[in-house]
Image: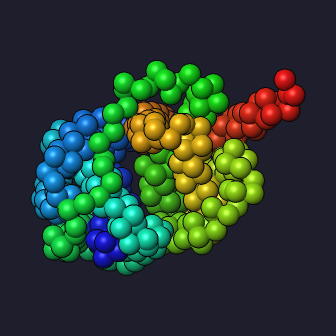
Amino acid sequence: MSTVYFFLFAAVGAMTPYLSLYYKSAGLSATEISILLSMVPALLFISQPVFGPLTDRSGHRGRMLSYLFLLIAGTGLLMSLGTSFWMILPAVVLWAIFSGPTVPIADSIALGEVVRTGIAYPRLRLWGSIGFVLTTTVAGRLYDTIDLRWAFAFYAALNIVAWFFARRLPAEGISGQRDVWPVLKQLLRNPILIGFLLLSALCQTTQAAHASFFSIHMQSLGGSKGMVGLAWGIAAITEVPVWLVLSKVTKRTGPLVLLAFSSLMYALRWYLFATVSDPGALLWLQLLQSVSFAIFMPTAVVLIGDLIPADLRTSGQALLVLVNGGVATILGNVAAGYLVDLVGTTLLYRVAAYVALAAGLGFVLLFRHSRRPAADPA
């Protein structure tokens, strides 16, 4: 499973950090770029309900994952053939439908291995980060000397290697079928949960905007494609040590404290991004990934587990994915595209800083509110 993770995220690292640069080189506007980058989160609402039950009924998650690797390899190549927004869009839609379920199915198989063998999940998932770091840094240097269309060929080749190893994966896993809507009403009776989801979505809009336009921002400051790849690699490698100790820290502080802290670190990170004019400085600022994204996303998963009854936790995690990975990501991408067309990437990061600051202060208030019942002897 660790080998599959390695090549899955190696493929991601070879192409996705450079998609916005490729779309820009094709003459697309920032708004059009944001629409294309929103296809994966938007189509999660279709692909997840379809492929989750389909994978469960197939009886063999490894085989289903291997088929998806071939499909995203082919549709990834199709994306390189378009020369305008309307030519690229159909290929992106197909790619988004097939790529959306790959990580959830892989996680399902990995969690099944955790239950069966007792191996720690981070030890499996860690190889995905290593694969991502290697390809972003190496590919970025290559793209300074070769056509960016090669990114799609490398993406396809790495997914074919992932297909080869995925064929050997076990059939079993943890069910990916998530029945969210029947229990949605029950979940949203908790005011702390509602506040958390709203603030989490607010912060995630800034992360989505960054993921979509960071490469363009760095290039606008004079950074090369090699520097872009190195920046993404630095961000990914900083996550690893944080994940190894985060569970212990969370037990001491509680998740809401960490969410408030990481949101405020997001605000600082985006503000500094808006103030520096040297692309080399952005490389150093990518180290702040360790105290923003690396803390925020795993802690959000932990908090959802704490706020929701055990029998509803699967639906709760699905709800978090739909809010953060779906709605917030789409809104962040579309708003960012509009702002970049209007005022440019520098002011986009300044706006993102204020939004993340609002989220951080909101988490501080939510933490204080959550402690009131415990302080009340009644």
Query: 109 above or below 296?
Result: below
The answer to whether residue 317 of the structure is visible from this angle is: yes
Q: Which quadrant is the C terminus positioned in? A: top right
- Residue 269 is left or right of residue 172, and the answer is right
Q: Residue at x 34, y 45 (%)?
A: 37
Q: Is residue 71 left or right of residue 37?
A: left
Residue drawn where x is 65% and y is 59% of the image: 291
User: What x and y, as percent, mark residue 332?
Assistant: 47, 38
Q: Is residue 95 above or below residue 149?
A: above
Q: Which residue corresponds to the image point at 46% horizontal and 38% vertical from the top-left?
A: 311
Image position of 128 (left or right of 210): left
Quadrant of res 189: top right
x, y percent for residue 259: 66, 47
Q: Nearer the viewer, residue 143 or 69?
A: 69
Where does residue 196 sit, x and y in percent of width and height? 61, 34
Colour style of the rendered protein structure: rainbow
Question: Percent x, y for residue 112?
Answer: 34, 61
Quadrant that contains the N terminus? bottom left
Q: Is residue 310 left or right of residue 356?
A: left
Q: Residue at x 42, y 26 (%)?
A: 183
